[in-house]
Amino acid sequence: MTVQQIVKDLILYNQNLVIEELMKHDDSIWDSLQNFDENTEVLEWWLVTPYMAELLKENGEVIFSDYDCYWWGRTTSGQALYMDWVIQEIARQTER
């Protein structure tokens, strides 16, 4: 897949407000984050497909899955999604 295909088809919506509200009302969410430690600073939350969540998780990215949804905890901000190192890496891994 190209980086453009990944961004268009597998990364769905920015969900900062949704996750922030969930976290305000449920502290246990922090315990269910995958690939998260105290040195990780999540700057944005993105709703992603289950397939993308798995690819991101395999590449060490923060993933929260609950409510039949998958969110990516993006640790960069201020640049286009396709410019993130992990998106470039996933595109390379999924090239056919």
Image (tube, rainbow, N blue to C red):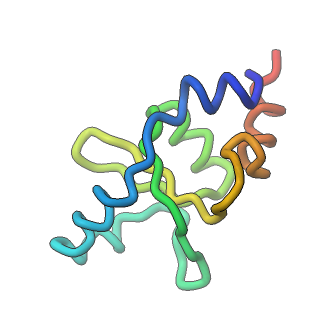
Q: Residue at x 24, y 77 (%)?
A: 27
Q: Residue furthest bottom?
A: 38
* Horizontal and vertical percent position of residue 56: 61, 46
Q: Nearer the viewer, residue 13 or 10?
A: 13
Residue 75, image x and y in percent?
62, 65
Q: Position of residue 59 (x, y in %)?
A: 68, 51
Please say if 82 is above or below 4: below
Residue at 64%, 29% (x, y): give it.
6
81 or 30, nearer to the observer: 81
As displayed, is residue 25 above or below residue 60? below
> How many numbered discs, if any?
0
Q: Quadrant of residue 60?
A: bottom right
Answer with left or right where residue 22 lies relative to residue 50.
left
Picture coordinates of residue 34, whole percent (x, y): 47, 61
Decide if residue 1 is on the left or right side of residue 33: right
- Residue at 54% from the left image edge and 68% from the top image edge: 43
Quadrant in which the C terminus appears = top right
Residue in view at x 69 percent, y 46 percent: 80
**In the orientation shown, which residue stands out farthest toward the front?**
78
What residue occupies the far left of the structure in this picture?
25
Image quadrant occupied by the N terminus = top right
Residue 75 as seen in the image, left or right of residue 3: left
> Does 71 sit left or right of 78 as displayed?
left
In the displayed structure, 44 sits above or below 70; it is: below
